[in-house]
Image: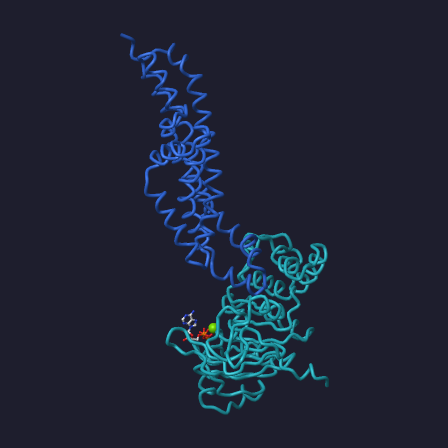
Amino acid sequence: MNDIWSWQRAADVLPLLLEGFRITVLATVVGMAIASVLGLLVALVRRAPSRWVTLPVGFLVEFIRSTPLVVQLVFVYLLVPGLSSLTIGFLVLGVHYATYMSEVYRAGIDAVPRGQWEAATALNLPRARTWRAVVLPQAIRKTLPGLGNYAISMFKETPFLFAIGVVEMFTAAQQYGSSNYAYTEAITMVGILFLAASYPTSVLVRRLETRLA
Amino acid sequence: MTDRDTTPAIEFRGVVKRFGDNTVLDGLDFTVAKGDRVTLIGPSGSGKTTILRLLMTLEESNGGLILIDGEPYTHEMRGGKRVAVPEKRRRQVRRRVGMVFQQFNLFPNMSVLENIIEAPVHVLGLSTAQAVVRAEELLEQVGLADKRDARCTQLSGGQQQRVAIARALAMDPEILLLDEVTSALDPEIVADVLGVLREVAETTDITMLIVTHEMQFARDVSNRVLMFDHGRIIEEAEPEVIFTAPREERTQQFLSAVLGEDTADRS
Ligand SMILES: Nc1ncnc2c1ncn2[C@@H]1O[C@H](COP(=O)(O)OP(=O)(O)OP(=O)(O)O)[C@@H](O)[C@H]1O
Ligand SMILES: [Mg+2]
């Protein structure tokens, strides 16, 4: 039997974990980039005057939000051939979180005081310009903490990518563990790496929250 | 006088406005001549704000017509039916109307200068350089030349309101709507803002519709006072007449109530 903790094994697995960590961070960054842009589009589309637009989009959003991420990953993986696992991971993470982000944007847009819209009308600003120059800058400022929180939560959900064969940090640890019959070091270090990345981010987000409040 | 000069700047023809089953204006008629300074007075809930908001298209009327320079503004008669004027044409008319709000409503994401040049650049199509020159003149006029690059959130209420006045003037409005523009301000700042407005009244021929509780200001600036009650004009006269010898008992009551609480009438 092995010792419970071996520094040698820890040193061996570290490079693998760091490569996995890179994928984890990449997935989070790309996923959140997609979620931020798509979420805003969804929020805007859901304000469209026509029910023919808002109802189907609303249904789709509810559907995505109420099915598990891992099911969506596997579903898309099986259904869409010709895309790499990583690409599918980015897209599914992005789309899944876009549904959450759209709510964050909606709240941010609703929080812009009516007087701002009225001042824009009184100045005769075109609709598009009102959105771009007045409403969105104020709304998006209010969405920054929400964006940060969802980034952390997405980061922590990246291990689900193992379901479609993406070797992110957790999968790398498992692979190492099963081929060396020793999980302790790898899994412990995964935990530490997650903590090391999430904790400062959440502190940052909380600071942002109080500063923007 | 040419024909154009006698066309009223504003005409309400049988305007109806309801909120749910509360009929606020029930067929209101009145006209405002070009260059007139009209003060609307009347008890709370009598419909003064509603009239200004209808003129700014912030509310939709439920009946009647509003004409600006004789042109249908929000609705028109077509084939005997009252139909809404499309937004594109409303915009062309709305360009002539400006408004200053009780709560200023400056854009907090922009600097003072950006607030003022936003519409001239994006609505009138001025170059940024032209708009800045004009904005600086206006800031000078309202006594805030040194605040050009400040964030609006860093300004006092009185300063914000003066920026808001400059912002409205930057659009060269023919009609300016002022809805209790000093009501949110500390008493000692009110005079600054009214001073700016007095100067605007003296140096321009902008048609002004003023809702205010500052009776001395109304007296100095306006040439006509309309007394409203329950959405109707119950008395209409020159300020000297209405403030010294109101005809209607309702007006007398209202004025003594307002002037009573403001005995130190700033004269
Ligand atoms: N958005 C709204 N929804 C429902 N009712 C409204 C709305 N705005 C105004 N009203 C009603 O319309 C009536 C006229 O209101 P308005 O604000 O025009 O009065 P006002 O003369 O400006 O009063 P004040 O001196 O208090 O400002 C009031 O009965 C008010 O309750
Ligand atoms: Mg009012």
Query: Within the image, what quadrant is residue B19 found in?
Result: bottom left
User: Where in the image, quadrant-wise, is ligand 1 located?
Assistant: bottom left
Percent position of residue B155, x then y = 56, 56
Viewer-side residue, B226 vs A169: A169
Q: Which chain is displayed in blue in the rendered image?
A: A
Taking B235 as reference, is B147 left or right? right
Q: Indicate the position of residue B41 as horizontal and vertical percent values.
A: 50, 80
Q: Is residue A159 left or right of residue B163?
A: left
Image quadrant in which you'd find residue A159: top left
Q: Is residue B221 visible?
A: no
Q: Residue furthest top?
A: A1
Regarding residue B55, the answer to whether it shows in the image is: yes
**B54 lies above or below B103:** below
Q: Is residue A210 above or below residue A73?
A: below
Asked which colour scheme the image uses, the reply is by chain
Compared to A141, does B164 lie above or below? below
Whole-percent x, y for residue A186 in the image: 36, 18
B50 or B156, nearer to the observer: B50
Query: Residue at position x 36%, y 32% from top?
Result: A74
Q: Depth check: give the residue in front, B144 or A92.
A: A92
Q: Nearer the viewer, residue B47 or B220?
A: B47
Residue at the spot 48% in from the left edge and 51% down from the top edge: A139
Q: Which chain: cyan? A: B
Task: Report the quarter where the N terminus of chain A lies.
Answer: top left
Question: How far from the left and from the top, in percent, is residue A65?
Answer: 35, 43
- For the image, the number of numbered tags is 0
Q: Residue furthest left?
A: A1
Splitting the image into 4 quarters, where does residue A54 fall? bottom left
